[in-house]
Image (tube, rainbow, N blue to C red):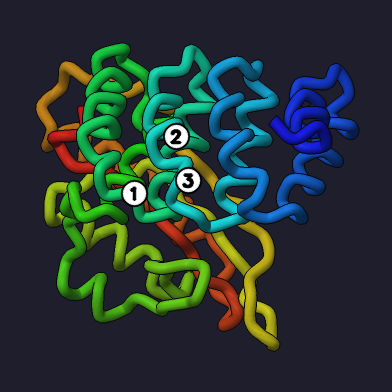
Amino acid sequence: MDGTIAQLVGELDADSSEVAEDAQHALIAMGSDALDELIAAVPGLGRFGQLCAIEVFTALQDPRPGDVLIDLLDSESSTVHQWAAEALADLEIQRAVPGLQRAYEAFRQRGEAPDDSEGVALRGALCDLGARDVVLPPRAAALRRSLENLDPAWPTVHLAEVIEQLAAHGQAVLYFQVWQVKPGGGTFGGHGPSIDWEIDRRLPWDRIVVDCRNWALPAAEATDKAPDLVATICWIDASDL
């Protein structure tokens, strides 16, 4: 291993997050020359070091880390699962689908709340890689506003109607986030309410859908309807419980 690369890789596990992040940025600046050594070192890194490595892989947009990212889906850290799933989708690693499916099934079997960030990331990765179908009602699709970094999103003036449409098509809304669209493009914010997931999962799915809709609608109706505000919505299907 190149001495400089070895030092930087080792610093990803530094006690100081500042040192680790500096090493991360230095590895990114080195480009693909650092990849092989970093890939080989990832299994021996701690949690924070692995997260830094994932950020390097994502920044470099090189598919070579695909196998090690798939292996990280078996990590003991849910955050590592989440970041690895997001990176696999971002790098378009199609062969990751079976591993992502196993990871999502394990997530479901553990009984984690469906709005947990790990579950959201795993579902999103499966969608991005074409291995999970998303139910998007035609009316909701017609109302969507496509933004470069937020798709799908909806003007908040249509938020309540979209939630009604999702419920009518058997989808349970978990939460939504409100974003301000900047005049020159881009978005700011990402705040919004989320359901306190205390719903009895033994209830019939139709009842769960209604309970989620009944939580989400008042929150949507109370949301500011300014023309520069859009909302993203997280929802699940019966197969996700």
Q: Secondary structure at mark 1?
A: loop
Element at badge 2? Answer: helix
Crowd class of label 2 (few under 14; some 14 to 19; many from 20; radius 10 Å): many
Q: CA distance from mark 2 to mark 1?
A: 9 Å
Residue at which label 1 appears: 93
- Report x, y in % for residue 114: 35, 30
Mark 3 or 1 closer to N-term? 3
Q: Amino acid at mark 3?
A: Ala
Q: Quadrant of the C terminus?
A: top left
Q: Is residue 210 visible?
A: no
Instruction: Give, as a three-letter code, the residue at label 1.
Output: Ile
Q: Residue 100, image x and y in percent?
A: 29, 34
In this view of the protein, can residue 25 be seen by the observer? yes
Q: Which residue is mark 3?
A: 87
Q: Which mark is residue 238?
A: none
Quadrant in the rendering for residue 90: bottom left
For the N terminus, the quadrant is top right
- Mark 3, secondary structure of its residue: helix
> Is 9 left or right of 50, judged from the image as shown?
right
- The image shows residue 178 at horizontal and vertical percentages of 56, 61
Q: Are marks 3 and 2 in contact (CB under 8 Å)?
A: yes
Q: Above or below — where is 130 with respect to 236?
A: below
From what the image shows, is residue 87 above or below residue 182?
above
The residue pinned by badge 2 equals 69
102 vs 188, nearest the viewer: 102
The answer to which of 171 and 203 lies nearer the viewer is: 171
Residue ID at (61%, 53%): 32
